[in-house]
Each structure stands twice: as C-alpha cells, then as structure tokens.
Image: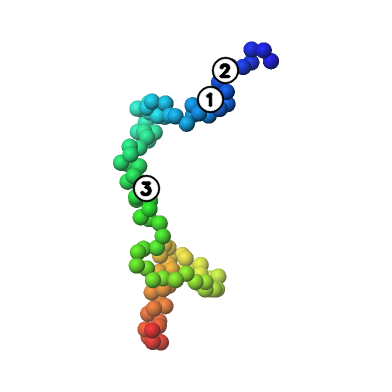
Amino acid sequence: MPGSKTNTMTRKQILDAMKIPPPGGYYVWDGVDEDDRPLSAEELQAGIEAYAKKQGRPAGSNKVSTTIRFDADVLAALKSTGKGWQTRVNDAMREWLKNHAEI
C-alpha cells in the first residue's frame, strides 16, 4: 500500500536502537506523585537486601519438613490461633515429650 510505511528503519536497526537506552533512561518522572518516582540505586539495593533477608527459614534452624495428619476440627482449631500455630504445636509436642518420653 503506497504511503502506509511510516518508518524507513529495518527491523534490525530498530532492535539495535532499542538496546541502547536514551540519555536519561526510558522513564521520565513528572515530579508530581512520589509513588511514581524511580528508585535510586541505593534504594533499589536496600530493597533487594531486605527482600533477601525475609526468605527461607531463619539461619541455624534445625527443623525438618514433615507431613502429619490431623482431624479436620483439630487442624481448624490450631490454625484459628493465628500465625505461628505450627511453632506452638512444635512447642506443645516438645513439652509432652519432656513429660512422657526421653529425647
């Protein structure tokens, strides 16, 4: 179709041009909404480090993943106590073992 071509660059030229960011980067902050402001390198690094610290079990944990079957009502009651219910079950089992068996 004559007149429909709006760009004289080849596909390769376009892809090559996209590899090099424009001066100042691709995003320009308008300065209005602080939530839209791009993070500085320091803020980005701090966020990455904070996220990395939150993942996984705490260092030095000797806990082992296992599967145990509870009656539905017992499990519901345990979970209803909120976050940390598995730790509380672990503590209750440890206390029971102190009184009933040798560890």
How far apart are labels 1 and 3 at the CA level? 35 Å
Q: Which residue is mark 1?
A: 13
Image quarter hosting the C terminus:
bottom left
**Which amino acid type corresponds to the residue marked 2 in the rendered image?**
Thr
In this picture the colour scheme is: rainbow
Q: Height in image: 7 above or below 44?
A: above
Q: Height in image: 24 above or below 43?
A: above
**Which amino acid type corresponds to the residue marked 3 in the rendered image?**
Ile
Residue at position x 34%, y 67% in the image: 60
Report which quarter residue 27 is drawn in: top left
**Which amino acid type corresponds to the residue marked 1 in the rendered image?**
Gln
Q: Height in image: 101 above or below 12?
A: below
Closer to the camera, 3 or 95? 3
How far apart are labels 2 and 3 at the CA level? 42 Å
Q: Which marked residue is nearer to the observer: mark 2 or mark 3?
A: 2
Mark 2 or mark 1: name the one nearer the start of the chain.
2
Closer to the camera, 47 or 70? 47
Q: Which residue is mark 3?
A: 48
Q: Which residue is mark 2?
A: 8
